[in-house]
Image: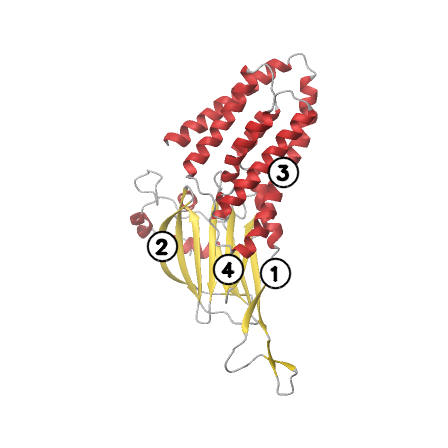
Amino acid sequence: MFISSIYHPTTAQAHAYSASYTQITMDQNKTEVVFSIDTLSIFELIKGIDKNKDWVLQQSEVEHKKHQIEEILTEGIALDKVNKEQTPELEKMKIVKKSNKIFLSIYLKYPAFSPGETISFNDGFYSQDTSTNYVNLLSANYAGETSEAALQGDNRTWTMLLTEVQQEQQSDSGQTVTDQYQKKTPPTAHVQPTTSTWFSFFKLGMMHILTGYDHLLFLLALLIRKQTFKQYAAIVTSFTIAHSITLSLSVFGIVSIPSRFVEATIAFSICYVALENIFRKKIHHRWTITFIFGLIHGLGFASLLREMAIPKSHLVVALINFNLGIEAVQLTIVLLLLPLLTYLFKMKASPKIVKFGSIVIVLLGAIWLIQRLFF
């Protein structure tokens, strides 16, 4: 029976950004699952776990509520073998840091899977919260083969079919024959994911920009000042190229900058552009400053994918689709804004409206800047 001190994972309301990571590792003897969820979600889901009310999860607090955590985990996630739910063995719970967030990692052990069987992972956390932006970034490995997915919205189930690859060998007559049961070289396993990986990362990119209010505010600050269509096109293009470059470099581990610096610089970029709108009489070559700040914004976009255990052979596809999702939303927003801005610029009061709007943007950016520098 569910303990009364726990909020049900399917009915609790998610905070501004809820995230979890799942790593599934399978071999001939066992299946290991590491489920990591951000600690703010833990505070929401388990009442009273933050005993000293400092909003920092301690290992002692985890141990005190270990049974409740195990209960809510059982309710929230499930691993199925051929449509039959498996019972896990809890090995340990550990507090870890991913990017600039603290997560609780829960290590579970399940029975082994065999070629010919279907494995499914279901995540029910926040599933009844229609406004949630909860996402579970999943990575699975079996006999050297991998599969990745971003579970979010209505798509909360990942499924993978394990099949055998027949081994080829030469017969005495020189003809090629197949044998699935060679004594010296046993058949290797081949994973056949049934979940649409590319679309899940496309949706993840869309969600990431839609919930990235600082990125959206920066884009608004860039566009709200009257400019020519050629200038607008140059701004959007330079921002796209810049953040695509650093997004790729960061995800591949080539560039690594502390998240506090990245987030603070993003807030500063909002303030800078908005102040230009207020004090500069004419706006020229804005695409250059957009490109510079776009490099920093790309590092902010990379925070999600960087923590996933995605092999480089799969990372390119995930990265492309993630970036396409970002661009689809960004382009849609620009196309929606331009007609509204064109109408605004025809109004006599447009200079005052632009100035007032820019002042509001400066204030919001300044608040974020102070928070990210000192808190």
Task: Look at the image and tell me whether residue 141 can be seen.
Answer: yes
Residue at 45%, 68% in the rendered image: 111
**Residue 227: x %, y % from top left:** 65, 21
* SS for callout 2: strand
Say above or below: 123 vs 17.
below
- Residue 32 in which image quadrant: bottom left
Q: Residue furthest top?
A: 348
Say above or below: 265 vs 124.
above
- Discs 1/4, front: 4
Say above or below: 170 vs 228.
below
* SS for callout 1: loop
- Viewport quadrant of the C terminus: top left
Instruction: Check residue 93 in the rendering and tell me which mark sits there, or answer none.
Output: 2
- Discs 1/2, front: 1
- Which residue is denoted by mark 3 in the rendering? 329
- Which residue is denoted by mark 4 in the rendering? 140
- Viewport quadrant of the N terminus: bottom left
Instruction: Check residue 194 in the rendering and tell me which mark sits there, or answer none.
Output: 1
Counting residues from the start of the chain, the first of labels 3 and 4 encountered is 4
Say if mark 4 contacts mark 2, CB within 8 Å: no
Mark 1–mark 2 Cα distance, whole angstroms, equals: 30 Å
Camera-nearest residue between 211 and 154? 211
**Residue 12: x %, y % from top left:** 48, 44
Amino acid type, label 1:
Thr
Q: Residue furthest bottom?
A: 172
- Discs 2/3, front: 3
Q: Is residue 246 left or right of residue 177?
A: left
Counting residues from the start of the chain, the first of labels 1 and 2 encountered is 2
Mark 2–mark 3 Cα distance, whole angstroms, equals: 37 Å
Counting residues from the start of the chain, the first of labels 4 and 2 encountered is 2
